[in-house]
Image (cartoon, helix red, strand yellow):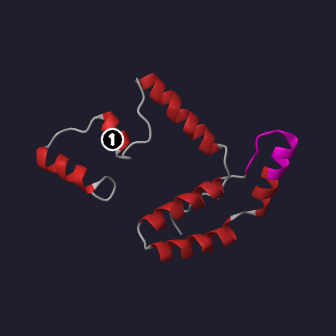
Amino acid sequence: LPRIIPDGLARELAYTGRRLTADEAQAAGLVNQVYPDQDAMLEGVLGIAREIAARSPLAIWGSKEMVNYTRDHSVDDGLNYVATWQSGMFHPDDMAEVFAARAEGRDPVFQNLLPVRRTL
């Protein structure tokens, strides 16, 4: 917890055992959004999911990989990793589709990534 919220707040919660309110969790960066009810929450998160799903699967996967790597490594290592990834990550077909879709006023359609094999 001290790695993701301010140290003082983590200590206060650990020492007192009190519960964190939704507004405090948002202010500390523990949650992105607080919704008034479950229906609003479902509408909000499904909207975010649709927005992510409309993007290139390769770009989403690469972004996730880079965010996870840079979180756990030094700034210098993280920047080198991101530069290496970005030099080879942008698939020419995805980039062409983005530009064509914008020119034609439509949403881009991307190819799915190949499934991960669990066995040899």
Q: On screen, 85 above or below 43?
A: below
Residue 15 appears at what percent x and percent y? Answer: 12, 49
The vertical placement of 1 against 105, above or below, is: below
Circle 1 residue: 25
Left or right: where does residue 41 sit relative to residue 4? right
- Magenta-drawn stretch contains 104: yes
| In magenta stretch: residue 101 | yes
In the rendered structure, which segment of residues is drawn in magenta? Answer: 99-110
How many numbered marks are there? 1
Q: In the figure, residue 54 lies in which quadrant?
A: top right
- Quadrant of the rendering where the N terminus is positioned: bottom left
Residue 56 spot, x, y in % from top left:
68, 52
Which quadrant of the figure contains the C terminus?
A: bottom right
At label 1, which amino acid type do we have? Ala
Q: Quadrant of residue 117?
A: bottom right
Near-viewer residue (69 or 6): 6
- At 56% across and 40% down in the image, what residue appears? 49
Of helix, strand and loop, which one carries label 1?
A: helix
